[in-house]
Image (cartoon, rainbow, N blue to C red):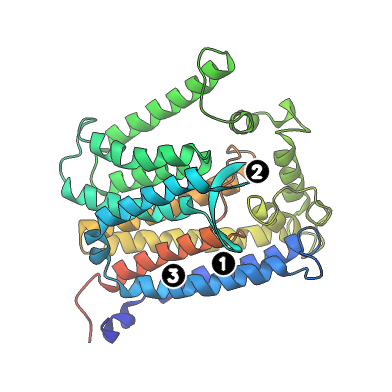
């Protein structure tokens, strides 16, 4: 790659990403040094996350050197690889967190559904670019639905409802960026919500059977009223609200949160890590994190707006849509305005596969931004 391209790197975006990662390591330390520490090493999870951060940095640099248009030329192969990995999960996957979502490689386990999001962003961008100006009806969107629907059904079969919802968010964001009529997207969203709510109601009434676990259905409805099952499905939300509410303005102090340190908070280093921030660092700490996440999304949107072609616009929109949905869903479920779906907070929650996939997304954004114009001397 031409060295002059490095002058076009969005260093602000990189600074924001690494600030979030470092912040996350501090909170993971607090969340795991007592309740989740492995053996004699209370900082085992911090060390693992730091190692994944180094691996992800290498992947980021590699992705930045690849012209995003070269990724599009490999679209068919990437789509096939995506389906192959998801099928392998169905055949030989390991169960974790209630879902058969993992592939084991010795002592290391990876989650292909995380990388499926990156694959679908690249391959869908190629499809949308070829159909630019031809996305004006439901019939026009049928190829898109099939393209996204096949891997999404494989993910639902694991079952991983959260990642399947991320697929929907990515698709809608990319369709909008590709010039699809906004009214058509609004109709799709309203129709989808209506069918989802109606389907859950019909399942509960015994009229149909949805291919979802009982705990997943409870998560979809319990956020409306956690008191329906305060010691069961509603327990997580109640404890999260208690933690965040008790933090006040400045919080109880790092390593001092009672809900966190006494293990009342569930999955406090992954799904409910924002609750740890709210309890121990209060409104100030939570607001600081949200500002960093806002800057992440803002810089991504800026890159999408400055992309030089439809490929760059749609790919950047897909990456930003992925981050935005993760943020809204993760933060929202901790304060009971969104259902619990087990979606981590980007660059912040513990998890190697998620961190690696998110860094690949940053690599795509940087590749688009670095090549937004002719090389500057």
Pick the front one: 309 or 127: 127
Instruction: Name the residue that disc number 1 marks.
Output: 20
N-term mark: 2 or 3: 3
Q: In this view, does 375 lie to the left or right of 166?
A: left
Instruction: Name the residue that disc number 2 marks.
Output: 335
Q: In which quarter of the image is the C terminus?
A: bottom left
User: Residue, x 21% and y 30% (percent of image)?
Assistant: 139
Question: Residue 51: percent from the left, percent from the top?
Answer: 59, 73
The local secondary structure at tag 1 comes to helix
Instruction: Name the residue that disc number 3 marks.
Output: 13
Distance in Å between CA atoms under marks 2 and 3: 28 Å
Q: Quadrant of the N terminus?
A: bottom left
- Report whether residue 319 is seen: yes
Mark 1 nearby-residue class (10 Å; few <14, some 14–19, many ≥20): many
User: Residue, x 49% and y 47% (percent of image)?
Assistant: 89
In this view, the mark in front (1 or 2): 1
N-term mark: 1 or 2: 1
Q: Based on the displayed image, in which of its 4 quarters is residue 61 positioned?
A: bottom left
Distance in Å between CA atoms under marks 1 and 2: 21 Å
N-term mark: 3 or 1: 3
Q: In this view, does 194 lie above or below 142?
A: above
Q: Based on the displayed image, in which of its 4 quarters is residue 49 positioned?
A: bottom right
């Amino acid at each position: 790659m031409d060295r002059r391209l490095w002058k076009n790197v969005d260093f602000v975006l990189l600074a924001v990403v690494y600030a979030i990662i470092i912040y996350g390591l501090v909170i993971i330390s607090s969340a795991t040094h007592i309740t989740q520490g492995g053996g004699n090493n209370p900082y085992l999870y911090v060390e693992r996350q730091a190692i994944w951060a180094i691996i992800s940095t290498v992947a980021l640099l590699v992705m930045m050197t690849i012209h995003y248009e070269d990724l599009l030329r490999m679209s068919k192969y990437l789509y096939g690889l995506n389906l192959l990995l998801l099928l392998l999960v169905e055949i030989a996957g390991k169960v974790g967190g209630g879902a058969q979502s993992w592939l084991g490689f010795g002592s290391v386990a990876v989650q292909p559904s995380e990388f499926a999001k990156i694959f679908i962003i690249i391959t869908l961008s190629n499809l949308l670019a070829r159909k630019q100006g031809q996305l004006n009806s439901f019939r026009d969107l049928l190829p898109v639905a099939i393209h996204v629907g096949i891997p999404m059904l494989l993910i639902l079969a694991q079952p991983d409802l959260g990642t399947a919802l991320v697929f929907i968010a990515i698709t809608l964001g990319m369709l909008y960026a590709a010039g699809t009529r906004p009214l058509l997207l609004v109709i799709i969203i309203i129709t989808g919500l209506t069918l989802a709510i109606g389907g859950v109601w019909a399942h509960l009434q015994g009229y149909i059977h949805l291919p979802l676990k009982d705990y997943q259905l409870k998560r979809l409805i319990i956020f409306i009223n956690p008191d329906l099952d305060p010691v069961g499905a509603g327990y997580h939300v109640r404890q999260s609200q208690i933690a965040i509410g008790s933090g006040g303005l400045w919080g109880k102090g790092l390593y001092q949160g009672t809900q966190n340190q006494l293990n009342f908070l569930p999955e406090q280093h992954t799904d409910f890590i924002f609750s740890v921030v709210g309890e121990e660092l209060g409104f100030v700490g939570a607001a600081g994190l949200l500002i960093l996440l806002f800057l992440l999304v803002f810089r991504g949107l800026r890159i999408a707006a400055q992309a030089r072609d439809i490929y760059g616009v749609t790919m950047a929109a897909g990456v930003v849509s992925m981050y935005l949905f993760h943020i809204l869903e993760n933060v929202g479920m901790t304060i009971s305005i969104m259902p619990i779906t087990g979606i981590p907070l980007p660059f912040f929650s513990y998890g190697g596969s998620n961190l690696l996939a998110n860094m690949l997304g940053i690599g795509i954004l940087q590749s688009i931004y670095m090549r937004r114009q002719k090389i500057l001397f």
